[in-house]
């Protein structure tokens, strides 16, 4: 066979490109190479641009949400439309509108989260189990992507600390590791092609970061059930870190002794670290992190240390060199 199938292209063939193209282009380059080989890539992409992306349909309202706190200095909250049509969720495609298109029929009924590792209460938890006895809080947080765009989102969720305590971690539990669903049937971005990303998507936090009151297990947006493109039915939000720490559609929470290897660090370790604290003075090797584009605004605004949450979190890092531990 002369034509290479997507799955025949080894990730090693595209590896050097990581050095000079950005995250999405790096993924897309693999797709274009495969598409060109198959003679369809460019045309189908061109056609895709012509359709208008639809925001998430309005879903079920969550009951009894308590106002939490807004830590945004009065900055305007982004709209439902913006938050559900401009996404990063590579399992559903690498363009910002792909998750809105491709996660539309994602099935989350009967969702279970496995708790494992260094803890007493291992097992499978349904969403109801996780939310049992909890008050869902609305937290309006800034969200800063490592790609230098940002939004303000009104999440609904519970403090991650509450759930961690219920799992009764052992003395050896130094980190919490989170894993996204692996489902090549439902997630087209996980199929075939050697994009250089190994699925499932994995993230992690140090135990004290997981216990910090700002860390949130999110199940809703704007008081409604979390839209699929934003990581339904349950995802993490850690507002002082780059957005990629906010792992979506979580199926496993593990307590580990050693620091987990998170997906972006594994994919490009010179560019993405474990900590990923928002830091305007540590640039990405290929772009500045000093400023950001707030979705809906024209001028770029300065990026704030720890995304503006320094008063709350800087004590966690007083013994850490944030240049080395980026
Ligand atoms: N499983 C998974 N989680 C993920 C991602 C992803 O591609 N897959 N993208 C991350 C990145 S880079 C960002 S900026 C946020 C985007 O969240 P949002 O689409 O709800 O704004 O999700 C993060 N969580
Ligand atoms: Mo991101």
Image (tube, rainbow, N blue to C red):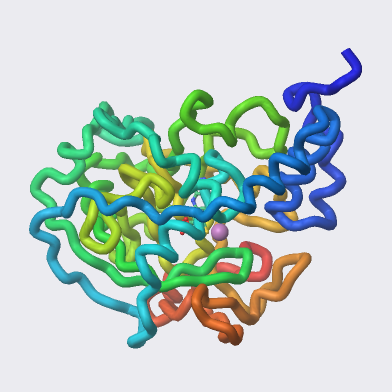
Position of the N terminus, as image quadrant, is top right
Question: Measured from the top left, where is residue 268 in percent x and y?
Answer: 72, 49
Label total for image: 0
Classify residue 47 as left or right of residue 41. left
Question: Measured from the top left, where is residue 317 in percent x and y?
Answer: 49, 70
Position of the C terminus, as image quadrant, is bottom right
Residue at image point 26% right, 28% down: 124
Residue at image point 39% right, 35% down: 106
Q: Is residue 7 visible?
A: yes
Q: Is residue 94 placed above or below 13 in the rendered structure?
A: below
Question: Measured from the top left, where is residue 79 in percent x and y?
Answer: 37, 70
In which quadrant of the rendered view does residue 45 lie? top right
Residue 273 vs residue 67, the one in the foreground = 67
Residue at image point 46% right, 71% down: 151
Q: Is residue 175 visible?
A: no
The outermost residue toward the top is 1
Residue at image point 36% right, 52% down: 56
Classify residue 151 as left or right of residue 265. left
């Amino acid at each position: 066979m002369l034509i290479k199938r997507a799955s025949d292209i080894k990730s090693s063939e595209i590896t050097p490109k990581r050095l000079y193209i950005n995250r999405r282009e790096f993924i897309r380059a693999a797709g274009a190479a495969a598409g060109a080989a198959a003679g369809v890539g460019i045309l189908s992409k061109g056609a895709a641009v012509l359709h208008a992306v639809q925001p998430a349909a309005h879903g079920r309202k969550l009951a009894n949400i308590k106002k939490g706190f807004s830590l945004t200095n009065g900055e305007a909250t982004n709209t439902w439309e913006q938050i559900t049509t401009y996404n990063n969720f590579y399992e559903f495609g690498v363009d910002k509108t792909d998750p809105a298109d491709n996660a539309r029929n994602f099935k989350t009924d009967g969702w279970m989260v496995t708790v494992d590792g260094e803890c007493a209460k291992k097992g499978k938890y349904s969403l109801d189990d996780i939310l049992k006895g909890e008050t869902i809080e609305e937290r309006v947080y800034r969200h800063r992507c490592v790609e230098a765009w940002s939004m303000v989102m009104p999440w609904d969720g519970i403090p991650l600390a509450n759930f961690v305590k219920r799992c009764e971690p052992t003395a050896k539990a130094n980190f919490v590791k989170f894993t996204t669903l692996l489902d090549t049937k439902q997630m087209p971005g996980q199929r075939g092609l050697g994009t250089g990303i190994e699925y499932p998507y994995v993230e992690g936090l140090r135990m004290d970061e997981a216990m910090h009151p700002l860390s949130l297990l999110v199940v809703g947006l704007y008081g409604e059930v979390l839209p699929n493109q934003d990581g339904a039915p349950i995802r993490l939000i850690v507002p002082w870190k780059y957005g990629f720490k906010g792992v979506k559609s979580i199926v496993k929470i593990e307590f580990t002794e050693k620091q987990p290897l998170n997906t972006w660090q594994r994919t490009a370790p010179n560019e993405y670290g474990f900590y990923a604290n928002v830091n305007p003075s540590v640039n990405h090797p290929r772009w500045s992190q000093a400023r950001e584009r707030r979705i809906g605004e024209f001028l770029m605004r300065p990026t704030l240390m720890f995304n503006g949450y320094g008063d709350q979190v800087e004590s966690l890092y007083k013994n850490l060199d944030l240049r080395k531990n980026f």
